[in-house]
Image: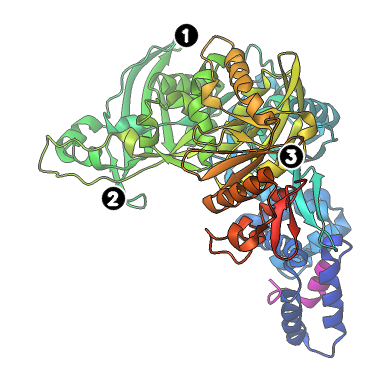
Amino acid sequence: MIEDAPIGHLKDFLCQSDENFEAAAKVTDAALQADLDDEGIKTRLLQDLNELPKELLQPVEVECQRALGLTEAKGPSALQEIAERNLDNEEHEEFEAQPGDLAKALWAHARHRKIFDDAVSYKNIRSWRNAGRLFAAFSVDRDPEALRFAASEIDTDKLGTAIGKRLKSSRKLSFSVIDLPKVPEYPASVLVIVRFAGQQTSVATHGEHGERRLMYYLPQDEAVLIYTPSLERIEVAATRAAVRRAVADCFAVETLGHDLSSRPLVEESYDTSRFLKTVELSLPDVPGCTVLSAKLTELELRIADWNTKLGVKVSAKLDMEDVVERYLAPGKVFRLALGVSKVLLQICFQGQHDAKEQILEIAISDGNSCSLNSERDPGRREFGRRVLEAWSIMRVFRDLTEEEVGAFIPIMAELWELDEKVQKGTFFTSRGIKTELLERASLIKRKEVEPVVIEDDDPEVEGPSNVDRTVFAVDLDWIQERLITAVKSILQTVTPDDTFGSAILLGLTKIDEQEVPCYLARGLGELKTFSRIDEFLRARSVLGPGIVFTGTVVAPRLVGANVIVPLSAVSSVEPQISIDRDALAIAFRAGRSLALGAGTLELVVEEGGEAARLHVPGRPPLDLIGEPSVQAFRLLVAAAKLGAPPVKAGDLIASSSSAGFQQMIGSTRWPVVEGYVEQVPPRRWKLKGY
């Protein structure tokens, strides 16, 4: 960016009054004061900035990338539209006078930061309209006379209160509301950018003197909404599915006066995979209308790879079924196709009170785009939706019931534990899971179909099923939300989510009249993750022994003074119950005595010798992972019990390749372990207190 930006704009950008730019500002001032031409200044700037510590340079690099984003694709037009609607005449003239897109972006960043931020958000939602994971579209029915709508009609205080309550946010929300004019691609609409406090998180900071401190903070999060009155359509982009749904619901109720109890928002997606099996269309029953004919007039398949298309378009005189039967050898092309990327449907129908027949054409492409959304007549639009639903092409969002949540907790927990954004269809079929309900609830989404190679000349050879070949995108954030909601349903005290890495403190439940803290964590089978979570839990040991819910059955039984409980072990399929309280109480009681430790010094070694737990009277248990660590503590415990002298460091590390005891334990685990041992000169170690 530095090479392409004017010197004056670089100075304004890098020397602005922002604490994140302080180091960059000093470097910039020094370069500008040197006796150099513009190219020399830029060369020195690049050298000096690259010599800054990473933690000082990274915030500047992030803002540079955001500025560059407004020079690419939809960025310039996004900034142009936001600037036109927020700057006064004099400011707008100054904006237009800037030499090029990059200069305009840097000028906006330095002089009008909110306009810059709004432009970035607007550009993102325009780019995300076809990106399923961060984007959702909802249909909302309104009185035809109320389709004229302007940004000035939005009561942001009322809307902010509703969204804040729904998201459980204790901080005030901020809004940017802008009228967007009609453009060739989209009708006139209203843009609403909502910024709010995200989920509490923490980061370990390293002080000037080497001390370690946890800093808790609420990162800013945002949701971007576009409401198009003429299409009765709400579009929302946000990183979490729960946020998308909450913002859409609150906007519909508080701003549009929509009654969700009788008419919940409709979230739509489209599945054209049925045409891999048959291109015939039945004549569905639609109340108030008679469907006279329905045909597929255009079909686009993806074959070999997703960039290779095979298209078929038939004239009005021909039927797609006949063309496919005669020319495409059914069972060959369709069996090997990766998927259907586009269809055009032609439906002839007559309304109950209409004298004439009507023709409705519906084009669907890429699973998230349908021409019905541009249909101006609400009656025709509703008819088209009913027909697509009857053919199982349009899938309306349907959340899981409490009973279904309980049934799907094991698979949701496993997906969350794996922490992978895509899964093959065989993952679900091998576990006997039908994906339809998970897809309707937007927990997973069909992404692509893998190619398959079979012997074409052998009709008896059956390849993998379409489901097995399908690759699904997994919405891990939405799955985590559902798991958290399920666990919180059994809590007596719900706390704001206290997050540290992959561990979350959710609140307190009661077992045997005792308050028990409940956590959700993943990755406990990995030493580094286990060590970090162990440290996180020890810092909260004042809460007493707790429950750590996890997504895997293969995990240690305990972490810190807490019992690990796989969610699959306590899920319930009883009506209105997701978590079985009785099963949870039994699991907690079984592990509580072990979590509290014994009254004497003891090292409990698991089978195989790869892990152990050290019980020290008056101290939380210490978990040890790895054969060298376990063997070292065998020697330390034996010496302590016998009253023998401290153990030589060489004996402690004999089963490892490390040069010292502390090195063998590792820097990640040492902050916890050092509280249980002490060094005795020369090069000997003993258990602390023995």
SS assignment at label 2: loop
Return the disc, 2 or 1, that comes first in the chain's sequence: 2
Q: Does residue 475 lie above or below 250 as drawn?
A: below
Q: Amino acid at mark 3?
A: Arg
Q: Position of residue 148 (x, y in %)?
A: 71, 28
Number of numbered discs on residues: 3
Query: On screen, 677 above or below 280?
Result: below
Q: In the figure, is residue 467 to the left or right of 54?
A: left
The magenta segment is: 1-14
Q: Disc 3 or 2, which lies upstream in sequence?
A: 2
Query: Which residue is situated farthest in the bottom direction here?
Result: 35
Q: Which residue is labeled 2 in the image? A: 304
Q: Amino acid at mark 2?
A: Ala
Q: Is residue 405 above or below residue 32?
A: above
The residue to which callout 1 is attached is 353
The earlier-in-sequence mark between 3 and 1 is 1
The numbered dot on residue 411 is none
686 vs 171, nearest the viewer? 686
Give the residue type that dot 1 points to: His
Q: Position of residue 425 (x, y in %)?
A: 37, 36
x and y, in percent, of residue 313 in the image:
29, 40
